[in-house]
Amino acid sequence: MKTQLFTNTPENIIKTAEILKKGGLAAIPTETVYGLAADALNGEAVAKIFAAKGRPMDNPLIVHVAEFEDIERFALVREIPEAAKKLAKVFWPGPLTIIMKKGGVIPDEVSAGLDTVAIRLPSHPSARAIIKAADTPLAAPSANLSGSPSPTTAQHVMNDMDGKIDAVFDGGACGVGVESTVITLAEDTPRLLRPGKVTLEELREVLGEVELDSAVLNKLKDGQKAASPGMKYKHYAPKANVILLKCTDDEFTDYVNRCGGSGVAALCCDEDVEKLCVKYISLGKRNDYEAHAQRLFDSLRRIDGYGNIVTVYTRLPSTDGVGLAVYNRLIRAAGFEVIDLEKS
Ligand code: AMP
Ligand code: MG
């Protein structure tokens, strides 16, 4: 299949929407990462997403709408909980996904057989324009090959998906850089399943009690069921081995320099740069967690682009604010391995 690369024009919004209406696959920009979209109400079209990504069929997809009213118009959920209305007022359009009890129109391919559905109203103008023009909700997971870092540019998508999907709509680099925050309202107490730009602290300000799912920070124990099936896989990993170091700032640069060698790189902060003697990519200023999130996946892909990097060292991130989203992605990229220099 030839994958068309569309520039950001009104005609290409229409062309992308037409591909989707006909049951095709198109990667679209959102404010979080690029999504691989299909008509969410067409099970056959949705099944093609899993094939293109190599995604396990038990990992459900997020359904994207252009307006809050679309949830009722398409009967996507059984009932909209009051908490969802409160969250939507504050955070939509934006990088928050809300899980609710699903309506009968949701194909099993979207919900992976669960009785819930994940819904998001993105703020990216091209994403909303494409959903509006297609006049159907769009199922859209991140547009990467399953397991690899999510794409934050159209070029990242082409690297993974060229020849496998109908089109990629180039809307420039994504502003947030990590996938949406996912919260479930399908149980008695709201629970954060995946951290993102909308933080746990912000969710608690709106809803009061919000639990943190144990899979956000920890590896699932053998036999433990994942509330969010996507949290159980090794994920976001570049080809190079990612090693997380729990340490002070000086220990970080000293340790990485001692490891040295041509196959080693540091994923670091601006403040480390002058102390490092190995290849590095900086995620930004030390306490600028939003910058770290925005650059994370692009940096992991660039490390692989060097060709010869075997090991990349980075610090165990803070779990405050947007730091929690970076922590969650990096701990999975590292397969949950952390070297604690404070203890050794
Ligand atoms: P992605 O589409 O690649 O951003 O991944 C979507 C994330 O949302 C995955 O971690 C899924 O497991 C999770 N997700 C989607 N739908 C549901 C659902 N109904 N219940 C729990 N988690 C979900
Ligand atoms: Mg993904």
Image (cartoon, grey):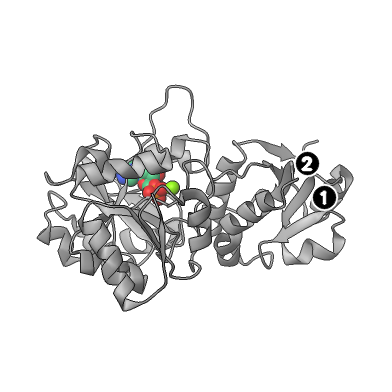
Total of numbered circles in the picture? 2
- Can you say which quadrant of the picture contains the C terminus? top right
Which mark is on residue 341?
2
The amino acid type, in three-letter code, at marker 1 is: Glu
Q: Closest to the observer: 312 or 185?
A: 312
Q: Secondary structure at mark 2?
A: loop
Which residue sits furthest front? 2
Which mark is on residue 150?
none
Residue under the image location 60 percent in, 36 percent down: 336
Q: Left or right? Give the position of 215 relative to 80.
A: right
Point out residue 174 in the picture as x, y percentages from the top left corner. 48, 66
Is residue 228 in view from this perspective?
no
Q: Relative to residue 288, is residue 9 depicted above or below?
A: below
Q: Relative to residue 212, is residue 289 depicted above or below?
A: below
Q: Would you name the residue on which mark 1 appears?
A: 251
**How far apart are labels 2 and 1 at the CA level?**
8 Å
Residue under the image location 44 percent in, 55 percent down: 179
Point out residue 273 in the picture as x, y percentages from the top left corner. 80, 63
Q: Left or right? Give the position of 16 relative to 339.
A: left
The amino acid type, in three-letter code, at marker 2 is: Leu
Residue under the image location 75 percent in, 48 percent down: 247
Quarter of the view holding residue 308: top right
Q: Relative to residue 225, is residue 316 depicted above or below?
A: below
Which residue sits furthest top? 223
Is residue 338 in view from this perspective?
yes
Q: Residues within 10 Å of mark 1 (few under 14, many from 20)?
A: some
